[in-house]
Image (spheres, rainbow, N blue to C red):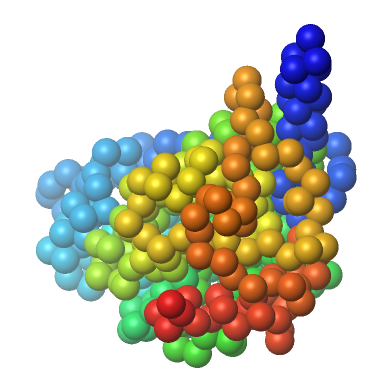
Amino acid sequence: MRRWKRSLTAVALAAAVVTGTAGWAAGSGQRPVTGPPPGSEAWRADTSLGRALPDPAHATPREVAAFFRTLTGAQQRGLAHRHPTVVGNLDGAPVALRYEANATALRRDARFAHLAGHGRQILAFDPRGRGQVAEVYGDLARSRHVAVLVPGSDIDAGTYDHPTDPYGTPAGMARQLRAAAKGTAVIAWAGYTTPVGVGLDAASGDLAEAGAARLTRLTDGLAAVEAPAPAVFCHSYGSVVCGLAAPHLKAGDLVVLGSPGMRADTVADLGTAARVWAAKDPSDWISKVPNVQLLGLGHGSDPADPAFGARPVPAADAHGHTGYFAPGTQSLRTFAAIARGEAR
C-alpha cells in the first residue's frame, strides 16, 4: 500500500511538471501541428514545369535537394513566389530560396508580418495553430559550424523572441550563442507545438513525439544541403523532444539544459552516436520535478545525474531555469566551445 501511494504521488507530481519558461501558469491541451505544410494541395497540382513536383508529404530532404538542383534560378524563384508556404518549409530546398519564400509568406500574414523585417533569415514559417518559426543567425551556407536551439514549453511564433526574457527564448539563446561562438551559424528552432503552462501535455511525451519527427527532418534537411552536422541544444521540455529524436538525429553533439528527462535511463539508451552533454544549475526549479516515468507521465532519469552518463557542463554560476545562456557564465562558454567543436 505504501509503495502504491508513493507511485500515485509521483504521478501527481509528474502531471504538475512545468517544462518551459513561463512559470506555474495553468496548462491547456494542445494539438500538434503535423503533416505537410499549408498550400501543399496547390503545389501538387502545379504543372508549370511539365512534371510532378516532389510531394511534401513523402519526398525526403535529399530528394527535394536533388529536384531543386535540376531547376534554373528563375524556375526556383517562380515556385517560391507561387507556393511560399511550401518552399519555405521544404527541408532540402536551397536555404536562400527558403528565406525568400518565407519573407513572402510572412508579408501576407497579418499575425506575423513583423517577422519579415529587413535582413531576417527565416528558415521555416508555419502559420497553423499558434504559429511555428525557425530563424537563422549567421551564414548557414558557409559556416563551418552549426547549432540548433530547441525550446521548451510556451514557445511559438509569437513568443520565441521576447525582450523581457533575453536568455530564455530560442531567439535570445541564439543571439548569445552566436556572439560567444564566433563563426557559428545558429538556428533558433520553434518548429513544433509546445505545451502551454502546467498540464498533462507538459508531463506526457505526445507533443515531444510529434516534435521529434519535425526536428529529425530539420537535421536531414541540413545534411541534404551539405551543412555541417549541428550541435543541438535542448532546453527543458525540448530535451524530451531531443531524447525521442536522438536515434535518428544527424547531430554531432546533443546538449540538454534544465532537463526534466529524455525518456531514457542512460546515454546508451538514447541510441545516438552524438556526444551527449547535460547542464543543470543549482537554482533551477527543474530539480524539484520528480524524475519518474509512470503511466505515460514524467520523463525519466535526470540527464545531469552522473549515473546517466552525459558529459557535464559547468553551470554553477547560471541563475534559474533560463540563465544558462547569460553572458559570462561557464555554461555559455562551454556551449560555445561545444558548438565550435573545441570541447572535449
Question: Residue 14 sits in which quadrant?
Answer: top right
The reply to whether residue 193 is in sight is no
The residue lying toward the viewer, choosing from 165 and 100, is 165
The reply, left or right, for residue 101 in relation to residue 65 is: right
The reply, left or right, for residue 328 in relation to residue 187 is: right
The residue lying toward the viewer, choosing from 94 and 335, is 335
Q: Identify the residue at image location x=45%, y=50%.
A: 267
Q: Position of residue 85 (x, y in %)?
A: 44, 53
> Vertically, is 112 above or below 203?
below
Q: Position of residue 269 (x, y in %)?
A: 42, 42
Q: Identify the residue at image location x=49%, y=55%.
A: 309
The reply to whether residue 227 is in sight is yes
Q: Residue furthest bottom?
A: 182
The residue lying toward the viewer, choosing from 91 and 228, is 228
Numbered circles on residues, count = 0
> Vertically, is 123 above or below 195?
below
The reply, left or right, for residue 49 in relation to residue 318 is: left
The reply, left or right, for residue 277 in relation to residue 295 is: left
Q: Identify the residue at image location x=69%, y=72%.
A: 315
Q: Residue furthest top?
A: 1
Q: Position of residue 328 (x, y in %)?
A: 71, 86
Question: Residue 294 sits in which quadrant?
Answer: top right
> Vertically, is 173 above or below 6?
below
Q: Position of residue 67 (x, y in %)?
A: 17, 57
The C terminus sits in image quarter: bottom left
The N terminus sits in image quarter: top right
Q: Identify the residue at image location x=67%, y=39%.
A: 291
